[in-house]
Amino acid sequence: MKNIRTMTMVAVLIALGAVGATVKIFNTVALDSLPGYFAALYLGGWYGAIVISVGHMLTAITSGFPLGLLNHLYIAAQMAVYAYLYRVAYKKAKAYGAVIMGTILNGPVASVLMVPVMGWGFFATWVLPITLGSLINTFLAVLVYEVMQKKGLTRA
């Protein structure tokens, strides 16, 4: 029964990622990763990795794959790692540490990792919007998780 409950939660969070993918902050930067970061906290890092990477691909689809399919797969893989590390940071440094680390990884670090493929112009154009989007997504995910925790609706 626990596996069915977890699979259902993952499906619901992916669906919320699809909705978040349509809420654009700037171009392809959207609220698609909020459910993935939340999943990492609520269900575990691996589930968060799945939800966030699917969420990114849904944003890429709704935006017409502006960076190409392979680049978006590369970004989805990066985001999977970041969601996993977000949970690790939360366990060690709580909300502030998770938000700071998630924002830095999915903002400036992710932008720098695209430089070999897209160039420094991409970095200069995208680092600020991606960092802002990351801050919003990581902050809202931890906020929802901690409110649920205070209400006794979480596992930990």
Image (cartoon, helix red, strand yellow):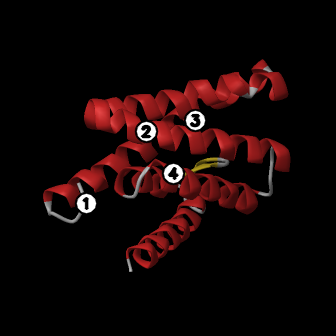
Residue, x 59% and y 45% (percent of image)? 80
Q: Secondary structure at mark 1?
A: loop
Q: Which residue is mark 1?
A: 155
Residue at numbered disc 3: 129
Marks 3 and 4 close (CB-CB < 8 Å): no
- Tell whether label 3 touches label 1 (CB within 8 Å): no
Q: Quadrant of the C terminus?
A: bottom left
Report the residue at 51% width, 51% height from top: 46
Q: Gap between marks 1 and 4, in whole Å? A: 16 Å
The kind of residue tagged 4 is Trp
The answer to which of marks 3 and 4 sits earlier in the sequence is 4
Q: Is residue 79 left or right of residue 65?
A: left
Identify the amino acid type marked 3: Pro
Which of the pair 27/52 is nearer the observer? 52
User: Which residue is located at x 55 percent, y 58 percent?
Assistant: 51
Estimate the spatial distance between the alpha carbons at disc 2 and disc 4, rounded to whole Å. Answer: 11 Å
Mark 1 residue type: Arg
Q: Nearer the viewer, mark 1 or mark 2?
A: 1
Which numbered dot is residue 46?
4
